[in-house]
Image (cartoon, rainbow, N blue to C red):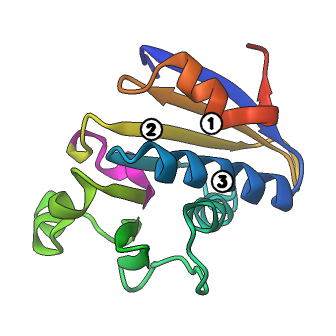
């Protein structure tokens, strides 16, 4: 994790993780800039809860589910699309091409769960989020980016930032 900017966060409940996600979603919507939100963590670390919060903060009002079997869900908010990927079941870069992955992760806002499977395929405009289990409900979260500044990351992390 050698990024130009990085910050450390902690959440202590599922609700905290979802509320942190809402901060990301609001920030992404307000910035109006392309952003790929890359989520990395073991099974059960909260990637889907975080994705739900991001989508809600972005303005999605419909049910938000992980696209584990569909691979991608699309949400429309005020004629702006939010693309949500789960690439867990994909094994080869050619599969990304087959689903139009590059079209939906560049010049728009997207969430990619299991992004560490294809780290070199994500755009420069990526916010990397690493989730690590502390205990049953608490998570250590690291934000890293070569695109966003440390000030941006602190703003996105809000009250969940620790040690900065």
Pointers 2 and 3 in contact (C-beta within 8 Å): no
Res 81 quadrant in image:
bottom left
Per the image, the residue denoted by label 1 is 156
Per the image, the residue denoted by label 2 is 127
Res 93 quadrant in image:
bottom left
Whether residue 41 is visible: no
Whether residue 44 is visible: yes
Pointers 1 and 2 in contact (C-beta within 8 Å): yes
Q: Position of residue 63 (x, y in %)?
A: 61, 86
Tell me which segment is drawn in magenta: 112-120
Count residues near mark 1 (Cα–Cα under 10 Å), then give few for <14, some for 14-19, many for 20+.
many
Marks 1 and 3, Cα distance to the nearest angstrom?
A: 9 Å
- Where disc 3 sits, the SS reads helix
Q: Position of residue 79 (x, y in %)?
A: 35, 74
Q: Magenta segment: does it hold 115?
A: yes
Tell me if residue 146 comes above or below residue 82 in the rendering: above
17 sits to left or right of 58: right
């Amino acid at each position: 994790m050698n990024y130009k900017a990085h910050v450390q966060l902690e959440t202590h409940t599922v609700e905290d993780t979802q509320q942190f996600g809402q901060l990301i979603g609001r920030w992404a919507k307000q910035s109006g800039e392309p952003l790929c939100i890359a989520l990395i963590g073991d099974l059960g670390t909260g990637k889907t809860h975080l994705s739900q919060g991001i989508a809600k903060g972005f303005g999605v009002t419909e049910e938000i589910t992980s696209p584990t079997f569909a691979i991608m869900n699309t949400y429309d908010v005020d004629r702006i699309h939010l693309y949500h990927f789960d690439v867990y079941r994909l094994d080869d870069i050619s599969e990304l091409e087959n689903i139009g992955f590059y079209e939906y992760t560049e010049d728009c806002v997207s969430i990619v769960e299991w992004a560490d499977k294809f780290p070199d395929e994500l755009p420069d405009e990526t916010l990397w989020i690493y989730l690590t289990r502390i205990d049953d409900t608490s998570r250590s979260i690291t934000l890293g980016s070569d695109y966003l500044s440390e000030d941006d990351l602190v703003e996105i992390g809000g009250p969940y930032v620790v040690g900065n």
